[in-house]
Image (spheres, rainbow, N blue to C red):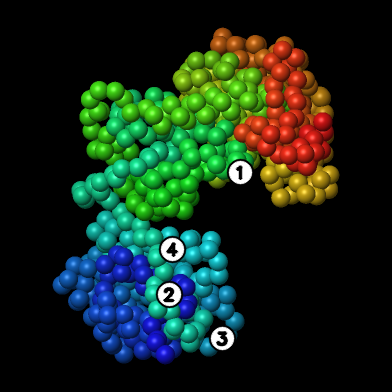
Amino acid sequence: MLKKYSDEKNIQLLIALLKAHDIKDIVVSPGATNVSFVASCQQDSYFNIYSCVDERSAAYIACGIAAEIGNPVVLSCTGATASRNYLSGLTEAYYRKLPILAVTSSRPNGWIGNDIQQVTDRRNPPADTALLSAQIPVIHDADEEWAYTVKLNEALLELRHRGGGPVHINLQTTYSSDFSVEYLPDVPAIYRVCIDDAFPEIENGKIGICVGAHKAWSKELTAAVDAFCEKYDAVVLCDQTSNYRGEYRILSTMVCSQRREESGLRNFDLLIHIGDITGATFRFNVEKVWRVCEDGRVKDPLKKLRMVFEMSELRFFSYYGGKPNKGEKMTKQFEEWMSETKRLYDLMPELPFSNMWVAQQTIPQLPENSALHLGIYNTLRSWDFFDTPSSVNCYCNTGGFGIDGNLSTLLGASLAKPDQLCFGAVGDLSFFYDMNVLGNRHMTPNIRIIVVNNGKGVEFRQHINRAAQFDEATDVYIAAAGHNGNQSRYLVKHYAEDLGFIYLSASSKEEYERVMDKFVSPNHSEHPMLLEVFTDAGDEDKALMIARTVDQAMYEVNTESNTKKIIKKVLGKKGVETVKRIMNR
């Protein structure tokens, strides 16, 4: 019977990526734990394999080969103390910047410390023996396959990165005896382009720019991105924290949140990814992703990364954008996105009194050149549906993505720019988590805070959250309902007023409309403001349901009476009855 590659998926991925990254030379030391890797490689004529019993000598042999050919060389050893003998040679490689890949085969890390034969801890090699150390366990499903394919690519790229050097991969094995796999899987390779490298060509196709959380943009970068979009008929897909304000901005939340999957707008041949972690619903069908970032790190949230450009965004877009096309601008895709977005907003019925309704009413009224800071999840999601004025920058603590620190970050921003009005919107749990900062003696009068108080972590009562299936039982522990006065009408009022805040409140649309003009006034006040909005968790969920299903023709809006009628065009009778129960209509 034909014997070729091991059936161990992690070993197949590594071998396929060694070939994709043009790594051919392997120095092998004997053993049992590395049989799956070594036997698979030796039956593939692509590789040049050398044998050395002593791992100390093997590491130095690899150094000699790498110095001569200028290309990475792989080391392979078994378990027990074998890998310890690589340390001298890897230290040499580190200080000489020689690209040596030490693949140490091992049993599962969970066995460490259990007095099992030949199990040693390889998780933390000395700092000057490896630029990067990756643990590659046995792979069980598609998610793990994607994650460790990214990790393997990152490790192989590091061999040549910024001058190069040694890298360590600890490759776990199941000791499988099955070598019946004839062909390696089609594993996506990721490549890095640095500023002095040759830039790949952009092929014909549909192109988008996906922007995560981003610092304020310079005029030069905005102009370069606009020129790029004009040349390639591209769009810039944003959330509130993207902060791009050029000609091709699309706040994509409304389109991307719809349950219907048929919209071809979300299909892209190439998506250029810039910025950092986002809280937005970026649901795209993508062939490949290019990431542009100055640190050159491999990050693949869209799971289709193929290139990392280690350079400034300005350098990237200036190179590819060049001079704009002569004649008419390329705006077809932008116009299609804008048309579809407008169509959805036109279909959207009136929202119930909720965080999302507050966002809908407040965002258009934000003063020019103000700043907006949002709490995570329900607040960020709700406020992401409605576009802010072009001069308003928006921020959220998406780095750690916790509920803590939102108000403190807002205070920091207000201190840095005392002449700028700084608005914040947070849920009640986030507010009470960080409320001590309201007593800080540096609190500035340019701060204005909206607290949406629904008495719980309403995120966990939303229909999109798996905890919602427990209904009211969710409130007891998961949603942490009933704390902090249980929607007391006086607790926050007294606290805020005693600290010098102007306190406003609203429990209905009419009450909110009466106080909103004061809250969003462009005139600076002598004191900071706090507007507490009391909402119901059920209404919060209804608002989200409405926003996510306008694309399904569920509603017909009567603009004269402002009433909503559920129709059957898409859902059918049974589906409509389900929605009626959810909507309490």
Q: For the residues marked 4 and 2, what is the alpha-carbon distance in whole angstroms?
A: 11 Å
From the viewer's perspective, tell me whether residue 495 is left or right of residue 472.
Answer: left
The Cα atoms of the two marked residues, 1 and 3, are separated by: 40 Å
According to the picture, the residue beneath numbered tag 4 turns out to be: 149
Near-viewer residue (136 or 565): 565
Three-letter amino acid code at the position of disc 2: Ile
Between disc 1 and disc 2, the foreground one is: 2
Earlier residue among tags 4 and 2? 2
In the rendered image, which residue does mark 1 sit on?
Answer: 402
Q: Amino acid at mark 3?
A: Ile
**Which is in the foreground here, disc 4 or disc 1?**
4
Separation of marks 4 and 3 at Cα, in angstroms:
29 Å
At x 44% / y 83%, what residue is drawn?
Answer: 180
When the figure is inspected, residue 350 is found, relative to residue 201, above or below; the finding is above
Whether label 1 touches label 2, CB < 8 Å: no
Task: Give whichever of discs 4 and 3 has the lower sequence position.
Answer: 3
Tally the marks: 4
C-alpha distance separating marks 4 and 1: 28 Å
Q: Are marks 4 and 3 in contact (CB under 8 Å)?
A: no
| Pointer 4 with pointer 2, Cβ within 8 A | no
Farthest left residue in view: 68
**Alpha-carbon neighbours of circle 4 within 10 Å: few (<14), some, or many (≥20)?**
many
Task: Give the quadrant of residue 334.
Answer: top left
Decide which of tag 1 and tag 2 comes sooner along the chain: 2
Q: Residue 578: image x %, image y %? A: 78, 41
Q: Residue at x 28, y 87 (%)?
A: 51
**Residue 43 rendering spot, x and y as whole percentages:** 33, 83
Frontmost of labels 3 and 2 is: 2
Binning the other alpha carbons within 10 Å of mark 2 as few (below 14), some (14 to 19) or many (20 upward) gives: many
Identify residue type, mark 1: Gly
Circle 3 residue = 116
Q: Which residue is tagged 2?
A: 11
